[in-house]
């Protein structure tokens, strides 16, 4: 079983489009959408959900007003500004802002009355769904929830389990943008990483940082340039940067307004296969499989 | 700008659910047509605003977060630190205590509850904060150290450095997770940049969930306008969200952006951003 993780550093470079195309080419892979706060893969693969489950990702402090003696021992111990003692006239009460609470339990531990309890917090939901091209694991984080990296890890773990059960040879992971906890979590265990980059000044800078991150984990990385003809000079700079890091370029997808228009109309993947952009993405998948079989 | 002398500084967050919709494009050009404004790049994982400023880089300042340091002479291996740490960042083994800095949230529990006073806190580098001055705008930004997992600490530090008296335009990270929330929180207005594609529309709705939760008023900027996708104007009308600006789908814009050029050097585009600035003033001065 091999795992391909598609990431980009910069958002909106075309990760999901690439992944959906790969899914269709592979035919029987397990897909994992690890962009848990703004997932989009389901919109292209149009899955039927078979199973859904809440995800408890963290704990949140909760005050039992009946037990609280207003001793103020908790005042000032929270480093995340989540605990406040609010006065209304003569009355005082301890309040927790659950959006700021990171679940460290310092307040609960200092409370001599055991008036602060740490409660499980549901931070999102995850799904097992069936698509025309195989099973897909995806999730949706609650807005602003902590510990999104844990939900990503959960999605990946379920994808691995599913792939083993279905004897699928490939896991295709659609990664989140950025270089933070979600991305680190999505990269973990990858056999090969595809970095989708655009030839723009931002795209080059973001490619450097994600490439540095993935190389730091000693992962085999490849580069797929999207909108490659938008700026030939920047495409050259991307290729040079990739070469200096030992990263192979697996394709140069042309700027293609027809593909954008098809996507805007919500046409599912597979339609409009003759577009030059999808043809190049498809070719890059064959290159990728070749690299994987060499490993 | 408003002529009222006592006007409170306005903070405008530029955000989106989906990445790559044009946040940095809007933020840099908007800041360029405003006077007395600081552009703040809070996308600390992949900051890009500085690429459009072309200023001489001022010396970055290192940013830190606290992580525990165990004094082995005082430690009795009692294990209390591991009990209180909710993040598995400190673990007591038979002969030593191990600290996993990458997992540490810096809450201070381990040092606070150590009965031997054996745990101090040391500084763990999480990146840099940088402020630069350029022809078009003053810029403040954070740059997360590659490999550092938690951007929110740095975002908080950068926000704390915003000059108090001036207006600020905040370029926020994509998504709806904690980093976005930390960036949008407390803004006077959040401009959600979207595009008329099913992805853009879907993620716009998710992002509106964040602004609603934070009680931040929202407005929408439609980029790549003209694509035959979902009716974002209709959606905004039905939900009472002002559409305060738009740019067409145009390869010329993409090419200028790719070279690191500001659009406002062109009079036509400049007018788009001046009108956006004026609409923001209308929307925020109630």
Image: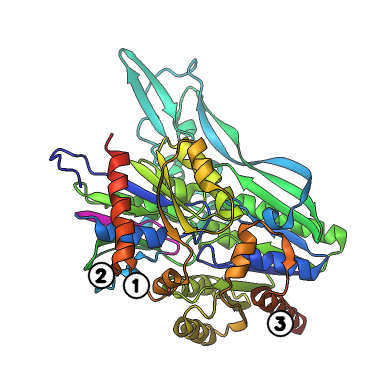
Chain of the residue that carries numbered disc 3 in the rendered image: A
Q: Secondary structure at mark 3?
A: helix
- The residues bearing labels 3 and 2 have C-alpha atoms spaced at a distance of 43 Å
Residue positioned most to the top:
A90
- Label 1, on which residue? B261
**Would you say B250 lies left or right of B199 here?**
left
Mark sitting earlier along the chain (2/1) = 2
**Would you say B150 lies left or right of A85 here?**
right
Where does residue B258 sit, x and y in percent of width and height? 43, 74
Q: Is residue B146 above or below residue A44?
A: below
Point out the stretch of residues depicted in magenta.
Answer: B36-46
Q: Which is nearer the eye, B5 or A145?
A: B5
Where does residue B109 sit, x and y in percent of width and height? 45, 42
Q: Can you tell which quarter of the image residue A84 is in? A: top left
Chain of the residue that carries numbered disc 1 in the rendered image: B
- Label 3, on which residue? A287
- Closest to the camera, between mark 2 and mark 1, is 1
Q: Are marks 3 and 1 in contact (CB under 8 Å)?
A: no
Report the number of discs: 3
């Amino acid at each position: 079983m091999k795992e391909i993780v598609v990431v980009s550093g910069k958002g909106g470079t075309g990760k999901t489009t690439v992944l959906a195309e790969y899914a269709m080419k592979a035919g029987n892979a397990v897909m994992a959408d690890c962009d848990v706060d703004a997932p989009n893969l389901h919109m292209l693969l149009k899955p039927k959900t078979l199973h859904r489950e809440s995800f408890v990702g963290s704990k949140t402090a909760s005050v039992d007003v009946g037990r609280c003696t207003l001793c103020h021992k908790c005042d000032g111990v929270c480093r995340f500004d989540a605990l406040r003692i609010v006065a209304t006239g003569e009355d005082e009460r301890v309040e927790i802002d659950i959006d700021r609470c990171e679940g460290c339990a310092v307040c609960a531990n200092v409370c001599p009355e055991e008036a602060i309890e740490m409660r499980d917090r549901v931070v999102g939901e995850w799904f097992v769904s069936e698509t025309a091209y195989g099973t897909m694991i995806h999730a949706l984080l609650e807005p602003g929830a902590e510990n999104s990296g844990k939900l990503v890890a959960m999605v990946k773990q379920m994808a691995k389990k599913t792939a083993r059960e279905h004897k699928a040879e490939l896991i295709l992971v659609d990664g989140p943008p950025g270089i933070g906890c979600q991305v680190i979590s999505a990269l973990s265990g990858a056999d090969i990483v595809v970095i989708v980059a655009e030839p723009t000044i931002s795209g080059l800078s973001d490619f450097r940082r994600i490439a540095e991150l993935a190389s730091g984990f000693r992962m085999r990385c490849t580069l797929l340039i999207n909108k490659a003809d938008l700026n030939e000079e920047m495409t050259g700079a991307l290729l040079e940067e990739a070469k200096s890091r030992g990263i192979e370029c697996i394709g140069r997808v042309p700027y293609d307004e027809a593909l954008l228009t098809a996507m805007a109309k919500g046409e599912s993947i597979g339609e409009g296969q003759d577009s030059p952009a999808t043809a190049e993405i498809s070719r890059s998948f064959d290159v990728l499989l070749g690299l994987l079989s060499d490993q | 700008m408003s002529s009222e002398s006592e006007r409170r500084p306005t903070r405008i967050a530029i955000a989106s659910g989906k990445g790559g919709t044009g946040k940095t494009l809007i933020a840099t050009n908007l800041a360029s047509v405003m006077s007395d404004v600081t552009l703040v790049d809070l996308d600390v994982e992949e900051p890009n605003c500085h690429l459009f400023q072309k200023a001489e880089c001022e010396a970055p300042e290192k940013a830190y977060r606290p992580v525990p340091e165990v004094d082995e002479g005082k430690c009795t291996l009692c294990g209390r630190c591991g009990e209180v740490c909710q993040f598995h960042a400190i673990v007591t083994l038979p002969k030593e205590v191990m600290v996993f800095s990458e997992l540490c949230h810096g809450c201070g529990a381990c040092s606070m509850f150590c009965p031997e006073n054996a745990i101090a806190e040391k500084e763990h580098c999480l990146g840099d904060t940088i402020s630069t001055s350029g022809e078009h705008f003053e810029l403040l930004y954070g740059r997360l150290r590659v490999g550092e997992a938690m951007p929110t600490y740095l975002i908080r530090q950068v926000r704390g450095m915003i000059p108090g008296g001036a207006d600020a335009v905040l370029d926020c990270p994509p998504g709806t997770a904690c980093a976005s929330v930390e960036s949008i929180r407390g803004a006077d207005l959040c401009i959600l940049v979207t595009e008329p594609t099913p992805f853009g529309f879907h993620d716009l709705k998710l992002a509106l969930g964040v602004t609603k939760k934070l009680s931040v008023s929202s407005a929408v900027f439609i980029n790549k306008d003209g694509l035959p996708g979902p009716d974002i104007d209709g959606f905004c009308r039905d939900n009472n969200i002002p559409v305060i600006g738009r740019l067409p789908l145009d390869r010329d814009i993409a090419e200028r952006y790719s070279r690191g050029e500001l659009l406002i050097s062109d009079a036509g585009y400049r007018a788009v951003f001046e009108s956006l600035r004026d609409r923001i003033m209308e929307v925020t001065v109630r």
